[in-house]
Image (tube, helix red, strand yellow):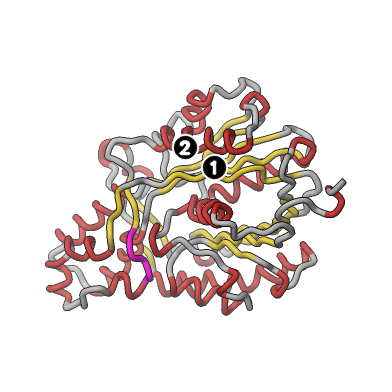
Amino acid sequence: MRYSSVCIEAIAYRLPEERVSSQEIERRLEAVYRRLHLAEGRLELMTGIVERRFWPRGIMPSEVSAATAADALRQANFPAEKIGALIHGSVSRDYIEPATASLVHARLGLPSRCLLFDLSNACLGLMDGVVMVANMIELGQIEAGLVVGTESSRCLVENTIEQLNQAEKLSREEFKQATASLTIGSASAAILLVHKKLSRVSHRLLGGIVWADTRSVRLCHGTPDDAGGDRMRPFMWTDSDQLLTAGIQAAKEAFPHFLQELGWNAHNIDLTFCHQVGKAHRKALLEALGLRAERDFVTYEYLGNTGAVALPVTAAIAIEQGAAKPGSRIAMMGIGSGLNIVMLGLRWGPMPEDIP
């Protein structure tokens, strides 16, 4: 995929105020730890995650998503009436129907001639949404679009703790398969994409690749969809070791195609944003792709794994802190269970042909 007309005009984020430490989660699992002879502090030691955050009880994803999308529009001083597409891409949604994007559209007061839908693809929902909106801009179908999502982790984490505490014959292996669910955090992100003729900042989305390795589709899965409604009690089973191995292998296969597509090499990438799983995944990924740790920006230590919003939230925080310099080559590399990969390249600030 190559784009000649697409700019990322703004990336906004919101974080909950409530912080929940890994130490606190282990305290709530004290009886399980004692029964399985698990060492205190193992959750943080294994993942590098010190804490994650929860939204207040009762808040709906659409409420936060609408506020975050409004932040992106305000940040860019961009008129809502020019938005031609709205995609809600987080795992968390308000209802099975209507689309959460409909609720966000209503809250923002976007135009009627705005294409809107939810896009679900595990931790890649927002990245896939960026591809969809970029394609529409490049084709001349729209001039601007919003990709937004809000992940809410409280229910999953608390239900996992409850089920682990109630499981009388829980094995170490079963506990390990539930551990990934204890790393999940809450956050919200919104990405505003525009045609370059409307851009004030000229942060160019150059293109990228998609990659699928569905041989690994069974390594991470959640509650069956027919367990919805009032009986919905989210739970995830993850073979973390095999998922890490399969994910890194798929990334190794995909990365050369990404570099070739953009005409880059690993050494001239100035900044990377990857999916925020934990320290073992990050170390293995950077080593496998020949990327430098000092050029990779992370948030998992204090946010946990925030699902589909993890990568854009990390990008927004990095930009806020001045990590993206004019002319920087930026790689955004998302990996989601399935396995699916999206790798996108940006050039930060005006490209030479954009400079008067």
- The x, y position of residue 296, in whole percent, is 57, 68
Q: Secondary structure at mark 1?
A: strand
Question: What secondary structure is the stretch in magenta mostly built from?
Answer: loop
Instruction: Pinpoint residue 167: horizontal percent, then vertical percent.
Output: 16, 62
Residue 65, numbered label: 2
Range shown magenta? 47-51
In this view, 201 is above or below 292: above
Q: Residue at x 16, y 61 (%)?
A: 165
Cα gap from disc 1 to disc 2, whole angstroms: 7 Å
Amino acid type, label 2: Ser
The residue where tag 1 is placed is: 190
Question: Measured along the vertical axis of the image, is residue 258 above or below residue 350?
Answer: below
Amino acid at the residue labelled 1: Ala
| 34 left or right, relative to 237 | left
**Contact (Cβ within 8 Å) of mark 1 with mark 2:** yes
Please state which of residues 226 and 9 is positioned toward the viewer in this rendering: 9
Q: Nearer the viewer, residue 299 or 332?
A: 299
